[in-house]
Image (tube, rainbow, N blue to C red):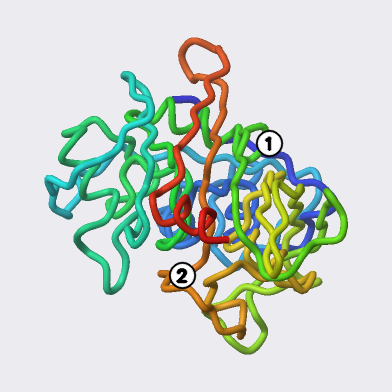
Amino acid sequence: MEPFRFEITEEMEDERIDKCLSMLIDSLSRSFIQKLIKDNAVTVDGVPVKGSYRVKADEIVEFELPESVEPDIEPENIPLEILYEDKDVIIVNKPKGMVVHPAAGHYSGTLVNALMYHCGGELSGINGVLRPGIVHRIDMDTTGSVIACKNNTAHAVIAEQLKEHTVTRRYVAVCYGCLKEDEGTIDKPIGRHPAERKKMAVNERGRRAVTHYRVLKRFEKYTYIECRLETGRTHQIRVHMASIGHPLLGDEVYSNRKCPFHLQGQTLHAKVLGFIHPSTGEYVEVEAPLPEYFSRLLSIL
């Protein structure tokens, strides 16, 4: 595989090298990048650097990914609703309550456990032993389309499309209140909440985040909307809609309103996912059908 190579721009100047790379490559976790740096795998103008190194404009950052490591997590025979699959990628309709990859408190029952059983050893290893195949993720209580990669070449191609914001990602959601405008754009930076570190927030020191929304149907106290992501920040739609006074119905993190329905978390579904296929170069788009709870809720409303 070709090594990753980036030229540092003026906007990135004086950022720590580990933070800079995590900003440039959404598909790699910061902890994974820090390990690469510790292993002297990351160079600036040809010289290995430490994680505390602060980059300068026009410097060239390069690194190669290590060979895949056999995951130490167990494959599990968990049924998957497969929307698309070939030798390079697989797209599934993730159910509510399923975590995408193992993490503290969730080492079984995840999408990764299910993919390992279904795909065998055919999953990319770029993102480390706990995230084989995973190039992006959605929240545990968000349903819908998630793409996973079966080899490192496909992973690198899809990761680049995510970085360049060329992947089509359209979500549907129900939010509190009636939106006055038929459509709009929320362009507000998102970063860690200054006081509650497990939450995200509109934060001027965060990364640029852009969400386009349009009204699909208005109800008496709620609005059914479609959101198109231009960027892909953690909890982006949830934070953005809450920031304009219309948090998502059922969201117990970004809304303090009492939900009158028996829901498990936010009413948010990743409906449409489109990308340029890493092998054929053709555009592929899939649509994940609404989960039963979402369709039933719309009928009630």
Picture quarter containing residue 173?
Answer: bottom right
Residue at 52% in and 31% down = 158
Q: Regarding mark 2 in the picture, which secondary structure is present there?
A: loop
Q: Which residue is mark 2?
A: 265
Label 2 close to label 1 by CB (< 8 Å): no
Q: Which residue is mark 1?
A: 164
**Is 179 or 18 nearer to us in this picture?**
179
Residue at 46% in and 14% down = 279
Q: Which mark is residue 23?
A: none
**Is 95 or 290 nearer to us in this picture?**
290
- Indicate left or right for 73 with 138 as reference: left
Query: As shown in the figure, which amino acid type bears the numbered disc 1?
Result: Glu
**Is 109 or 58 nearer to us in this picture?**
109
- Indicate left or right for 226 with 95 as reference: right
**Is 267 or 210 nearer to us in this picture?**
267
Q: Quadrant of the C terminus?
A: bottom right
Query: As shown in the figure, which amino acid type bears the numbered disc 2?
Result: Gly
